[in-house]
Image (cartoon, coloured by chain):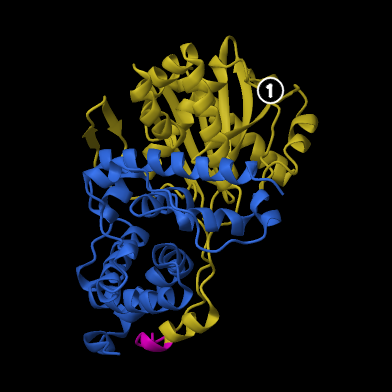
């Protein structure tokens, strides 16, 4: 891995480590939700940190976490472009018509019904992972990472109004999926 | 306000993204619309359930090592700061750029900055406590009743100090939600004025001296001490709220040293 100029600036390396490494779990979490695959998430996070280091000189704030998220998002987009064979996984912003259509899709796997009724972490994680993009991304940035609407708008490069409508839809979809599971017998 | 507007805005209300004025508009609509009130309640419960569940993943140690190896070595490796959620962060936060965002529905003033966002949520929580007839969960003028009540309800033990002799009557405690997290509220009264003192944990143990702000006509005095963030909010005049804060801090100091 090229780490170029940073090698001769140990102070920069230390500052980068201090600033960026505490967010590793957060960045990894977002990668898991965006890519829905643990191995791909690890690769994306590593690439994100190397890119972040490369651009650390131009980093002017305001907050490290959203900045890392924006970089990770670009890494994930590139990963999706590479996976062109599976276009349904696209993380690209949905256009207006896609925002109108119901985008809830059933989760691929069918875990035991007992787990479905429990509101435990893995069940919710699975429901969230089954949300369609871009609602999943917006939802995760707000509910799991506690970013403000403005920060989400910056990370996803969309207007704040779009963040609001996506979040409303994401919550509506999650809620109906949640209720649907609870009503399932057994 | 129409239900269509409220349907979007109630999310911003839950998230504390509305300033107090717009929050009041949404709350006014909800007060007259059972359907939207039910929606708000359902979504608020969902948000709270989600906030109370650990949905983050932990980066595998192998990944941590891989990244560590790929990054250039630092001269003096430091102990890594614990990664925790940046909830109710310290006050020394970001820029004070104000963000005005107009949507097609209503012009909404979004506060760009976490400190302000949380403060406006604090004011909303204060307003809710006054409107809904839900000022206190535990009613007591006895600090030894109020303080233990918080046990098991919060991950912090908020200090409860009786200031009755100093002109501020302790009337109870309440569990509230700010920034989608449970937060302790200790309720005091001076004459007819209610003071909500919100207390939340912070990662920083550094002491932050008191600052006064005014949002929508409410005064907020905030400070940090010993790993806790405090916001006192009231419609009391600024000088009386400052007096409250000073007396609270003084009482805290004497209770820890004495």
- Please give the residue where the numbered disc 1 appears in the rendered image: B170
Q: Is residue B168 above or below residue A38?
A: above
At 42% across and 46% down in the image, what residue appears?
A: B91
Residue at the front extreme, as displayed: A185
Residue B68 in the figure: left or right of residue B183 = left
Q: Nearer the viewer, residue B166 or B63?
A: B63
Q: Nearer the viewer, residue A21 or B229?
A: A21
Q: Magenta stretch?
A: B69-76
Residue B22 coordinates in the image, percent (x, y): 35, 23
Q: How many numbered marks does the figure carry?
A: 1
Output the chain of dot 1: B
At 37% across and 37% down in the image, what residue appears?
A: B116
Residue B96 in the figure: left or right of residue B144 = left
Q: Is residue B96 visible?
A: no
Judging by colour alone, the chain drawn in yellow in this rendered image is B
Q: Is residue B196 visible?
A: yes
Residue A12 in the figure: left or right of residue B38 = left
At 61% across and 15% down in the image, what residue appears?
A: B133
Residue A66 magenta: no
Residue B147 in the figure: left or right of residue A142 = right
Q: Quadrant of residue B15?
A: top left
Residue at the left extreme, as displayed: A58
Judging by colour alone, the chain drawn in blue in this rendered image is A
């Amino acid at each position: 891995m090229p780490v170029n100029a940073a090698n001769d600036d140990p102070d920069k390396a230390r500052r980068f480590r201090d600033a960026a490494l505490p967010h590793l779990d957060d960045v990894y979490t977002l990668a898991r939700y965006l890519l829905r695959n643990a191995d791909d998430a690890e690769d994306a996070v590593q690439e994100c940190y190397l890119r972040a280091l490369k651009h650390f000189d131009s980093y002017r704030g305001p907050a490290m976490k959203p900045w890392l998220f924006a970089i990770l998002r670009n890494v994930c987009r590139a990963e999706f472009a590479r996976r062109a064979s599976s276009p349904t996984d696209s993380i690209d912003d949905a256009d207006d018509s896609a925002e109108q259509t119901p985008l809830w899709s059933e989760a691929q796997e069918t875990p035991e019904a007992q787990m479905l009724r429990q509101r435990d972490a893995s069940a919710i994680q699975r429901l969230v992972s089954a949300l369609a993009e871009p609602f999943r991304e917006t939802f995760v940035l707000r509910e799991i990472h506690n970013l403000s609407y403005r920060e989400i708008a910056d990370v996803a490069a969309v207007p704040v109004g779009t963040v609001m409508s996506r979040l409303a839809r994401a919550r509506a979809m999650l809620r109906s999926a949640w209720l649907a599971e609870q009503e399932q017998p057994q | 306000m129409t239900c269509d507007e409220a349907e979007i805005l109630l999310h911003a209300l839950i998230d504390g993204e509305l300033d107090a004025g717009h929050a009041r508009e949404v709350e006014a609509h909800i007060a007259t619309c059972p359907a939207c009130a039910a929606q708000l309640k359902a979504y608020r419960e969902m948000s709270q359930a989600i906030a109370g569940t650990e949905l983050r993943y932990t980066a595998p140690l192998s990944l941590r090592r891989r990244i560590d190896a790929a990054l250039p070595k630092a001269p003096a490796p430091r102990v890594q700061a614990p990664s925790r959620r940046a909830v109710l962060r310290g006050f020394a936060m970001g820029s004070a750029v104000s963000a005005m965002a107009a949507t097609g529905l209503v012009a909404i003033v979004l506060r760009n900055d976490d400190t302000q966002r949380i403060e406006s949520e604090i004011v909303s929580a204060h307003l809710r406590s006054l409107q809904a007839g839900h000022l206190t969960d535990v009613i007591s003028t006895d600090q030894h009743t109020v303080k233990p009540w918080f046990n098991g309800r919060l991950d912090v033990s908020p200090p409860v100090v009786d200031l009755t002799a100093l002109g501020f009557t302790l009337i109870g405690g309440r569990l509230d939600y700010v920034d989608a997290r449970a937060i302790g509220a200790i309720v005091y009264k001076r004459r007819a004025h209610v003071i909500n003192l919100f207390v939340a944990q912070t990662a920083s143990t550094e002491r932050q001296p008191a600052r006064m702000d005014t949002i929508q006509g409410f005064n907020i005095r905030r400070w940090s001490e010993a790993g806790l963030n405090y916001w006192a909010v009231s419609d009391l005049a600024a000088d009386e709220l400052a007096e409250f804060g000073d007396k609270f801090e003084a009482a805290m100091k004497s209770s820890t040293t004495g």
